[in-house]
């Protein structure tokens, strides 16, 4: 079975490597500052720009009175901009089924491929962010089908 690197372009591989690094940095910063992590997207635009997008609720936000999960709001926003976007990562903290453990989930997507990363972490105090084992699996495309 071919690995994801054997199935993707150099651009996709480079984007995923960079998005994973940035996603981990953002998670570490936000978890250290807030002891929590609302889902956030790191977006590489087709023109070469990069931006961080969060789904903040405001009075004008179409979701402000809804129960739509933040991750779904981010995906809706990315779908609305799909012609502008080259690749993205959605970074969130997820509960491990059957345990009380929380892991980072980083959903990486490029026009060519989707990858799901689960990364164990430990924060014994606000200054320490230790990474544990990483698991990767082929993901489901959220924006490009």
Image (cartoon, rainbow, N blue to C red):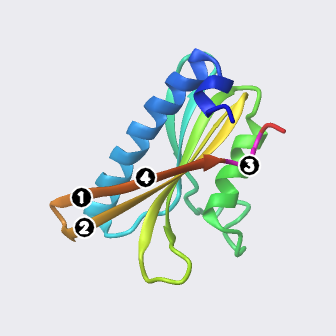
Q: Which residues are magenta?
A: 139-143
x and y percentages locating residue 92 in the rendered image:
50, 59
The residue indicated by pointer 1 is 129
Cα–Cα span, label 4 and label 2? 16 Å
Q: Which mark is residue 140?
A: 3
**Pointer 4 or 1: first along the chain:** 1
Residue visible at 62% across and 43% down in the picture: 115
Name which of mark 4 and mark 2 comes first in the sequence: 2
Q: Is residue 11 left or right of residue 83?
A: left
Vertical position of residue 137 compared to residue 46: above or below: below
Residue, disc 4: 134
Can you say whether 26 is above or below 99 in the image?
A: above
Which residue is painted at 50% across and 34% down in the image? Answer: 51
Cα distance, mark 1 to mark 2?
A: 5 Å
Residue drawn at (38%, 53%), measured in percent from left and top?
27
Nearest the camera: 135 or 103?
A: 135
**Considering the numbered disc 3 on the image, is that residue within a helix, a strand or a loop?**
loop
**First in sequence: mark 1 or mark 2?**
2
Residue where numbered disc 2 is placed: 123
Q: Are marks 1 and 2 in contact (CB under 8 Å)?
A: yes
Contact flag, marks 3 and 1 (Cβ < 8 Å): no
C-beta proximity under 8 Å, tags 3 and 4:
no
Q: Main secondary structure of the magenta part?
A: loop
């Amino acid at each position: 079975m071919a690995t994801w690197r054997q199935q993707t372009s150099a651009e996709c591989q480079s984007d995923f490597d960079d998005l994973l690094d940035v996603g981990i940095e953002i998670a570490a910063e936000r978890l250290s500052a807030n002891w929590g992590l609302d889902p956030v997207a790191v977006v590489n635009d087709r023109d070469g720009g990069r931006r961080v997008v969060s789904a903040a609720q405001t009075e004008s936000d179409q979701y402000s009175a809804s129960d739509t999960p933040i991750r779904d709001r981010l995906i809706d926003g990315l779908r609305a901009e799909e012609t502008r976007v080259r690749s993205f990562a959605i970074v969130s903290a997820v509960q491990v089924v059957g345990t009380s453990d929380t892991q980072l989930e980083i959903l990486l997507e490029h026009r060519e491929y989707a990858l799901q990363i689960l990364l164990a972490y430990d924060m014994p105090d606000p200054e320490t962010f230790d990474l544990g084992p990483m698991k990767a699996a082929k993901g489901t495309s959220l924006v490009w089908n």
